[in-house]
Image (spheres, coloured by chain):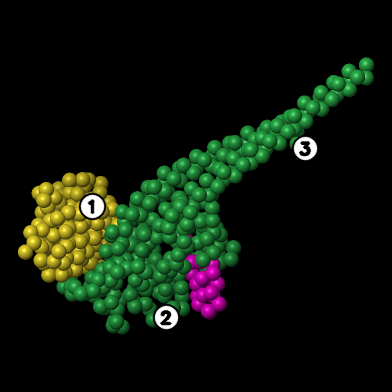
Chain colours: A yellow, B green
């Protein structure tokens, strides 16, 4: 069994990380999951949360908002709508994200009321977790 | 023959023009490099995204119960044309080329009896189509204030398109933009974004059977709107690079033309100066002879 797998974290604007990782903890829509080498091929959507990578240079973590992750035996690719290293997240960033989520709830139709409310709750939980 | 003073002024003014076009060319070159970098950095995301979408679409798309964004509304009567052009001029045939392709498509659709609606992004295209198709306009996105194209800009446009789709305003949406090939070549391109069509050149991965969490349908419902934003974003970036490339070569041409003009005017100036001197000499000599 391989010890590491290729891990890529990309956002539409740039590629944030591309390295060999031993494990990646992903905030999946249905709950956190940890992907390790030889994981069964899986595609999951993301909720706003913290993504943690165990790489050769120790652990690094990123705040991600929506997007999805594609996991296969040799590689894990996370395509996040927005991804920021946790150390760089500012209060202003979070304010903007929470404000957007709040707007979405306010403008939601009956169909996506639940989804937007959950997104807002996740966003606020992320803010608490980051402590900004 | 114009007099000397006029010629001198002309030369000075063309020289100024050349300075301006030269400066614009260099600014465009610098912006082009940035735009190209941005386009390159977004490529990994777009490629992976499209690959995953293509796989999902293939597995879900067969059924009629698929989401509307994927399978369409079952009609193609009302067509939305999203016309992406630049906010500024002086970029050669860039805007005209995109508009030409869009105009041909609109005429074709109208001839086929379809209803056409137009959403413009960037004011140059809006101005060019206004006379013929002004009554088809349903909206305009202003990008004047945007210095650096970000994903949030694309999301804004995508939201606008999606809310109109949800409201049943159109069945098929196509974006028109210029694909960046290199500095001298930008290809006007039409890309259908609703219903989702796998862009050309996407390699669909075969073999791996994925587990989906949550279900395939839910993931698809989550990804399809993002797909629109992603397509819009990459079109915006391509367009940005194309605009700067077109402007750079247009300004390069203008600079060269100004140079040629200066040479021609200088020769003319020197000739007429010589003519004046010769004239004066003749006058002096004939004056002396007359004594």
Residue A117 drawn at (x, y percent): 22, 63
Q: Residues within 10 Å of mark 3 (few under 14, many from 20)?
A: few
The reply to the same-chain question for discs 3 and 1 is: no
Tell which subunit mark 1 falls on: A
Of tags 3 and 2, the one toward the viewer is 3
Q: Which residue is mark 2?
A: B75
In the image shown, does B29 or B78 lie closer to the viewer? B29
Q: Say which quadrant the C terminus of chain B sits in.
A: top right
Does A31 appear in magenta?
no
Of tags 3 and 1, the one toward the viewer is 3
Q: Residues within 10 Å of mark 1 (few under 14, many from 20)?
A: some
Q: Which residue is mark 1?
A: A16
Q: CA distance from mark 3 to mark 1?
A: 66 Å
Residue B88 drawn at (x, y percent): 50, 50
Q: Which residues are magenta?
A: B102-120
Tell which subunit mark 2 falls on: B
Using residue B11 as the reference point, say whether residue B281 is left or right of it.
right
Using residue B194 as the reference point, say whether residue B24 is left or right of it.
right
Decide: is B159 above or below B245.
below
Query: What residue appears at the point 52 percent right and 60 percent down from the top-left corner?
Result: B97
Q: Which residue is mark 3?
A: B1
Q: CA distance from mark 3 to mark 2?
A: 68 Å
Q: CA distance from mark 1 to mark 2?
A: 41 Å
Does B103 appear in magenta?
yes
In the image shown, does A1 or B92 lie closer to the viewer? A1
Query: What residue appears at the point 16 percent right and 59 percent down from the top-left corner?
Result: A6
Are the residues tagged 3 and 1 within 8 Å (C-beta)? no
């Amino acid at each position: 069994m391989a010890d590491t797998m290729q891990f890529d974290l990309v956002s539409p604007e740039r590629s944030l990380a591309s390295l060999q990782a031993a494990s990646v903890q992903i905030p999946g829509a249905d709950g956190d999951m940890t992907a390790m080498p030889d994981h069964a091929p899986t595609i999951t959507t993301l909720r706003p949360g913290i993504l943690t990578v165990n790489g050769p240079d120790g652990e690094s973590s990123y705040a991600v908002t929506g997007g999805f992750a594609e996991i296969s035996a040799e590689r894990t690719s996370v395509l996040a709508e927005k991804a920021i290293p946790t150390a760089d997240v500012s209060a202003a960033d979070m304010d903007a994200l929470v404000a957007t989520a709040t707007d979405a709830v306010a403008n939601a139709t009956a169909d996506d009321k639940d989804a937007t409310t959950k997104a807002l709750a996740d966003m606020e939980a992320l803010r608490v977790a980051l402590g900004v | 023959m114009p007099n000397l003073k006029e010629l001198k002024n002309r030369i000075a003014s063309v020289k100024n023009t050349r300075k301006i076009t030269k400066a614009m060319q260099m600014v465009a070159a610098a912006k082009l490099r940035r735009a190209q970098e941005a386009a390159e950095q977004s490529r990994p995301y777009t490629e992976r995204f499209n690959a995953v979408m293509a796989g999902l679409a293939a597995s879900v798309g067969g059924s009629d119960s698929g989401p509307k964004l994927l399978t369409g509304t079952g009609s193609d009567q009302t067509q939305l044309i999203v016309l992406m052009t630049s906010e500024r001029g002086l970029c050669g045939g860039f805007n005209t080329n995109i508009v030409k392709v869009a105009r041909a498509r609109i005429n074709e659709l109208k001839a086929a009896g379809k209803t056409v609606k137009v959403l413009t992004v960037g004011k140059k295209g809006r101005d060019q189509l206004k006379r013929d198709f002004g009554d088809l306009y349903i909206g305009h996105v202003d990008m004047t204030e945007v210095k650096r194209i970000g994903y949030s800009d694309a999301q804004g446009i995508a939201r606008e398109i999606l809310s109109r789709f949800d409201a049943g305003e159109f069945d098929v949406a196509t974006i028109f933009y210029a694909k960046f090939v290199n500095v001298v070549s930008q290809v006007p391109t039409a890309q259908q974004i609703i219903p989702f069509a796998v862009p050309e050149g996407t390699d669909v991965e075969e073999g791996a059977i994925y587990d989906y969490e949550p279900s395939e349908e839910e993931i698809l419902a989550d990804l399809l709107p993002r797909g629109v934003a992603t397509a819009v974003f990459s079109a915006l970036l391509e367009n940005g690079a194309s605009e700067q490339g077109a402007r750079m070569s247009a300004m390069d041409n203008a600079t060269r033309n100004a140079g040629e003009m200066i040479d021609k005017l200088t020769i003319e100036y020197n000739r007429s100066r010589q003519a004046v001197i010769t004239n004066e000499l003749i006058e002096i000599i004939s004056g002396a002879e007359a004594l």
